[in-house]
Image (cartoon, rainbow, N blue to C red):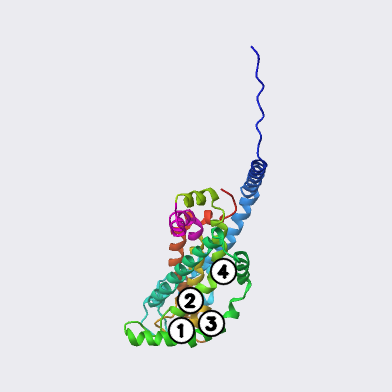
Amino acid sequence: MSSVAPVDLPIDDERKEDAFEEAAEGTRTARAKRRLTSRWATLAALIIAVLWTIPTFGLFVSSFRPAELIQTTGWWTIFQNPGFTLDNYQDVLFSPSMSSPQLGAYFVNSLAIAIPATIFPLVLASMAAYAFAWIKFPGANTLFIFVFALQIVPLQMALVPLLQTFSFWLRPGQAWLHDVIPIIPEQNYLPVWIAHTIFALPLAIFLLHNFISEIPRDVIEASRVDGASHAQIFFRIILPLATPAIASFAIFQFLWVWNDLLVALIFSGGTQDVAPLTQRLAEMVGSRGQDWQRLTAGAFVSLVVPLVVFFSLQRFFVRGLLAGSTKG
């Protein structure tokens, strides 16, 4: 019985290149994983975590100490100078005195600023990222480079032009809308929302584009063959697959807006009905900084919402940070 020699089938050059790229990428990924999970990397991460946590722990301890002990002794002397009180939190949250600003009323203002200022850039950036990644139109590359370059423009350079534009166009429109519908306040959050959206769009488009452009082309092409429109592809395929990247940027954007003072102070007008939490924290120390001990309790009150947002979205955080780093 004669044996038949196997026939060498031809292999496309593109398949060879893809196989080599996948092998090389797998090698690089394994090497990076070994380095990041080594004993020295773990030790360095623990040291950084401890050094980062010590000041926060000291602030937490100080928030429960009496004002006179905070101003005269360090938090590390708590065993030598023991003292425990909730007066700082009561003073910050519930004091009726105008000289002792309350934070409770300003939580609503910060939420009213931060939530829309996070949703608006995510909606616009996700649509723009899809257009740059999967819609061919003239000047797409040039426009994307321009959007990318906007990230290097200092925020402070745009404050005065935006304020002039809002004063000339937006304020009269708000006043007219208030006259037509009196229930809408004349001084509202619209300038702050627009400013935060403008400042967030370049980075949001860049990060989401990196993730959306790595979605396999076969998935998009199969959808187009089945007759799906761009809207159907975007809402039924792109958004579910891009959820980790969207959630990761939502965390960064929300934390940036929540902790922002400069933009909110300039575009909100600083009035009590729209002032954010950070503005009240800045005023809490008094005109000469004599009441700075209130900041210990005020800081932890302001930490509650960011912690809730981070821990509720943390399962998407790592996957979103790695957006665009691997193929397939």
Distance of mark 3 from mark 2, alpha carbons? 10 Å
Residue 194 image label: 2
Kindly identify which residue carries mark 4. 202
**Mark sitting earlier along the chain (3/1):** 3
Residue 229 belongs to magenta span: yes
Kindly identify which residue carries mark 1. 170
Lateral position of residue 302 relative to residue 328, left or right: left
Lateral position of residue 225 relative to residue 47, left or right: left
Mark 3 crowdedness (10 Å alpha carbons): few <14, some 14-19, many ≥20: some
Kindly identify which residue carries mark 3. 162
Residue type pointed to by label 2: Ile
148 relative to 244, above or below = below
Residue 140 belongs to magenta span: no
Mark 2 crowdedness (10 Å alpha carbons): few <14, some 14-19, many ≥20: some
Distance of mark 1 from mark 4, alpha carbons? 23 Å
**Mark sitting earlier along the chain (2/1):** 1
Which secondary structure, mark 1?
helix
Residue type pointed to by label 1: Leu
Residue type pointed to by label 4: Pro
Quadrant of the drawing holding the N terminus: top right
Most frequent secondary structure within the magenta stretch: helix
Which secondary structure, mark 3?
helix
**Mark sitting earlier along the chain (2/4):** 2
Q: Please provide the residue range marked out in magenta.
A: 227-247
Residue 45 image label: none
The location of residue 276, given as percent across then percent down, is 45, 77
